Structure formats: structure tokens, C-alpha cells
Amino acid sequence: MTRKTTGIPGLDGMLQGGFPFPSAILVAGEPGTGKTTLAVQSLFHGAREGEKGLYITAISEPQWLVQKFLSSFSFYNQELVEKGVVNFIDIGPTLLKNPSDMLNIIKKKIEQYQPLRIVIDPITPMTDMLQWRGETREFMHEIFAYLKAFNCLTLVTAELSYDDISHSQESYMVDGVIMLSYPEEEKVRRKFLEVLKMRGTKHTTGRQLIDITDEGLAVQAGLR
Ligand SMILES: Nc1ncnc2c1ncn2[C@@H]1O[C@H](COP(=O)(O)OP(=O)(O)O)[C@@H](O)[C@H]1O
Ligand SMILES: [Mg+2]
């Protein structure tokens, strides 16, 4: 099986070497748990190895704000952005005009940029724009089928808690699920990462402590 290293210190070791390739991975967790950090860190890691990267967002946070926040991390590389190796795009305005055209809008962008790594961050507000549940299910099904056929690594983030994930339709459609959490335990908050599912590979189970620093997200050394 082909794999791609994740760019997250400690995570490759939990996944027998990296993300299966091609694959679509769901990065789930409540706000502030580190989903954007993990996904974009992996995007820049790929870009440093010459892989074209595409970051797609919509409505939730204006694109410039996301980029401003991300540029404080050491993995962020403006030169790769200027050279067009990593591309940040906001499809929010296009989507607002016609939410039902979401799948085509995303497909067109992927065909235009031809990325090897894709981040869709976060998908939840996009699917919230679809009017009925059946439409969301259909969209999810089609987008994941399309991504799998495209021969790329996609990280899709979603604002889901542990309670949500067990009955979320997304988790059944993807090749892998990484859950990030930030529970309050004995009045201290610690951040965790758990691999809930990874098709075709053994993986470490259970919540692992993580750190987020200026260098980005890392599974705590000693637990690797
Ligand atoms: N340089 C940093 N050092 C330590 N923690 C940081 C740094 N930058 C951001 N964080 C923290 O990491 C988290 C980043 O979350 P983010 O990736 O935006 O999460 P999500 O996308 O899940 O909402 C926030 O909780 C923030 O406080
Ligand atoms: Mg985020």
C-alpha cells in the first residue's frame, strides 16, 4: 500500500508509516481542538516534498483570517503560497448563490489546481447550507466517491463531538477518522488525538496526548 507521511510528529508511528494513499480522512473535533492546524500542517508538509496542495473553505472564517492565524506557525511558508504550490481558496461567495451546486464547484476547483493533498475545512457549514438531510447525504456520498477516484489525499474537517461521531454519516464514508478532543478533566484541559478508524492499516488505539505550539501539532513524545 502506498502511504504519505502526515507531517504531524508522532502520527506516522501511530499509522504504520502515514496516511494510506489515496484516501479521504475525516478530522473531527469540537471548535479549538486543532483540526485546522493538523490539516494545514500536513498540507505544507506535502508541499515541501513537492506535492501541490489545495485548501478549500467556505463562509465560516474569512480566508484572510485563517491565513493570518496559520502564518504564525513555523510550518507556514509564504513562498510556497506565492509559488502556487499551496493554494487557499474560499468558495463561500459562490456557494451562497447556489448551495446545490456545491459538488460541481468543488470538483471544478480540484480539476483546476490538480492537487495531491486537499483540505476541506470545515465541511460542516457547507453541508448546513444544503436544505434537507437527503441532499447532504447525497453530497457526502458523491464528494467522497469523487475524491477517492481522483487519486489524492484529502483531509476533511468536521465539527463533531464524540457523541456525534458514532452516528455521523461522514464517518462511514471515509477511509479514516481522526478525532481531536479537549476535555476538561479534574479542572485541567488537555488536548488529545485518537485514530478511530484507518482502512487497510493497523493503528494505535486510544486517546494520545498532543501539544500545539508555534511548531504546530505533535503527538507527545514518550507516548509515540
Ligand atoms: N502558537 C500556538 N501555540 C499553542 N497553541 C496554539 C497556537 N496557535 C493556536 N493554538 C491553539 O491551538 C488551537 C488551534 O485550533 P484550530 O486548529 O484552529 O482548531 P479547530 O480548527 O479545531 O477549531 C486553539 O485552541 C489555539 O488556542
Ligand atoms: Mg478550524
Image (cartoon, rainbow, N blue to C red):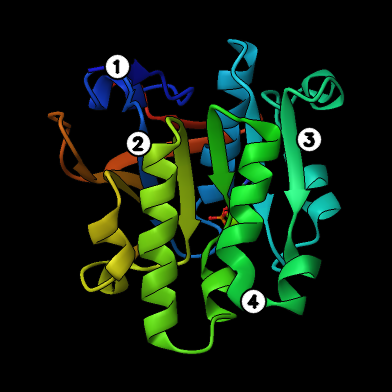
Residue 127 in percent (x, y) is at: 52, 73
Gap between marks 4 and 1 measured at Cα: 35 Å
Nearer the N terminus, badge 1 or badge 3? 1
Q: How far apart are marks 1 and 3 (CA)?
A: 30 Å
Disc 2: which residue: 23
Q: Mark 2 or mark 1, which has the lower sequence index?
A: 1
**Is residue 165 visible in this depiction of the protein?**
yes
Instruction: For label 2, count other residues whose C-alpha is less than 10 Å away and answer few (under 14), some (14-19) or many (20+).
Output: many
Cα distance in 3D space between marks 2 and 1 = 10 Å
Q: Which residue lies most toward the bottom here?
A: 132
Side of 141 relative to 103 (left or right):
left
Q: Mark 3 points at which residue?
A: 71
Q: Look at mark 4 in the image and give the residue it sits on.
A: 99
Q: Is mark 2 within 8 Å of ligand 1?
A: no
The residue where tag 1 is placed is 2
Q: What amino acid is at disc 3?
A: Ser
* Residue beneath the point at 46% across and 40% down: 154
Which quadrant holds the N terminus? top left
Q: Name the residue type under label 2.
A: Ser
In the current view of this chain or complex, which residue is farthest to the top?
49
Give the mark nearest the N terminus, 2 or 3. Answer: 2
Left or right relative to 202: residue 223: right
User: Which amino acid type is marked by label 4?
Assistant: Pro
Earlier residue among tags 4 and 2:
2
* Amino acid under disc 1: Thr
What residue is drawn where x is 26% and y is 73%?
163
